[in-house]
Image (cartoon, helix red, strand yellow):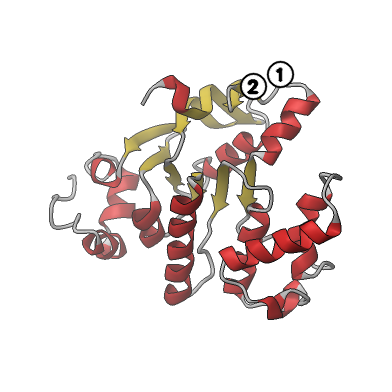
């Protein structure tokens, strides 16, 4: 892929908290239209990397560019523009508990201060239809929603401003298999319909295999593998062997006809 397709560029990232080094020389580019998934064990720095892309944390060294602009050198107007071009689905939904479903989704629109309430109403209802949430839920509070419904409403809010880039933090965590599959199908259809670029953190192999176009595996403070699923599973590394070639991993790979094509690395 050429450089003009780059949506996110990470160059020479080094991250340290006290004496603990999380990342060493991380270089990664997210290209327009792809679904890049970050995987790694506990403490591998995948969530930290996601937060650095979002501008919620700053690396010790290195640069983070989004839409061609450095996260740390842009003026306020450019940062606002970047914010409006991206949406985030946090792990537990992160809906505001004191706001209704409608007001949670309307909040980013109201922050623009340029849309009237009639238009906001129509847009909120459109976003709810996109994530297959019925109008009967608009006045409910988050505490009244099921786990799967919280994810859908949070996804609607992430899409409120028609972003080009969507961040997903464990989108199927805490859901049973049937709900997970429905969320995966929804994300897949939205990506195609809206031509989204997606960065996802997940530990769920079925979600990983179903959605990802590329996977970055974090371990030992580095990216130890980068490529599509077929390429990544061939890499000889202890984490990859345990994660992808354990019993659960092989079951997931078999669904996508990968486990039978390759032999586990020794």
Which quadrant of the figure has residue 255? Answer: bottom left
> Does 109 sit above or below residue 6?
below
- Secondary structure at badge 2 equals strand
Vertical relation: 157 (above or below) 200: below
User: Mark 1 packing: few (<14 Cα in 10 Å), some, or many (20+)?
Assistant: few
Taking the image as drawn, is residue 231 in sight?
Answer: yes
Neighbor class of circle 2 (other Cα within 10 Å; few <14, some 14-19, many 20+) is some
Q: Can I make out residue 92 in this image?
A: no
| Residue at x-position 63% and y-position 53% | 159
Residue 127 x/y as whole percent:
64, 61
Q: Which residue is mark 2?
A: 70
Quadrant where the image shows the N terminus: top left
Q: Secondary structure at mark 1?
A: loop
In-front residue for pair 166/15: 166
Residue 200 position within the rendered picture, expressed as x and y whole percent measured from the top left: 50, 48
Q: Residue at x 49, y 56 (%)?
A: 190
Q: Is residue 120 left or right of residue 11?
A: right
Closest to the observer: 139 or 212? Answer: 139
Tell me, yes or no, whether the two marked residues, 1 and 2, touch with CB atoms within 8 Å. yes
Say which of 224 and 35 sits in front. Answer: 35
Where is residue 42? Give x, y as percent: 50, 49
- Asked if 24 appears above or below 211 in the picture, the reply is above
Question: Distance from label 1 to label 2 (Cα)?
Answer: 5 Å
Q: Is residue 125 left or right of residue 206?
A: right
Disc on res. 122: none
Quadrant (top left/top right/bottom left/bottom right) for the C terminus: top left
| Position of residue 33 in the picture relative to residue 138 (left or right) | left
Q: How many marks?
A: 2
At 77% from the left and 51% from the top, the residue drawn is: 109
Residue 223: quarter of image: top left
Which residue is the site of mark 1?
A: 73
Residue 75 on image: x %, y %: 77, 21
């Amino acid at each position: 892929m050429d450089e003009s397709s780059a949506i996110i560029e990470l160059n020479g990232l080094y991250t340290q908290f006290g004496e603990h080094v999380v990342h060493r020389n991380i270089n990664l580019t997210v290209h327009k239209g792809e679904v890049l998934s970050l995987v790694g064990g506990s403490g591998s720095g995948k969530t930290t990397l996601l937060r650095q892309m979002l501008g919620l944390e700053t690396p010790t060294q290195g640069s983070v560019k989004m839409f061609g602009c450095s996260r740390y050198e842009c003026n306020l107007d450019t940062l606002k523009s970047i914010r409006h071009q991206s949406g985030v689905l946090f792990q537990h939904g992160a809906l505001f508990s004191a706001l209704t479903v409608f007001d949670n989704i309307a909040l980013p629109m109201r922050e623009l201060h340029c849309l009237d309430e009639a238009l906001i109403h129509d847009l909120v209802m459109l976003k709810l239809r996109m994530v297959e949430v019925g109008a009967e839920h608009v006045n409910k509070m988050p505490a009244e929603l099921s786990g799967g419904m919280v994810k859908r409403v949070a996804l609607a809010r992430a899409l409120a401003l028609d972003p080009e880039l969507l961040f997903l933090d464990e989108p199927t965590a805490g859901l049973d298999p049937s709900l997970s599959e429905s969320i995966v199908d929804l994300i897949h259809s939205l990506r195609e319909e809206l031509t989204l670029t997606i960065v996802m953190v997940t530990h769920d192999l079925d979600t990983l295999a179903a959605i990802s176009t590329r996977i970055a595996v974090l371990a030992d403070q580095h990216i130890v593998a980068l490529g599509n699923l077929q390429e990544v599973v061939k890499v000889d590394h202890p984490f990859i062997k345990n994660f992808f070639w354990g019993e659960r991993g092989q079951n997931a790979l078999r669904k996508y006809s990968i486990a039978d094509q390759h032999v586990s690395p020794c």
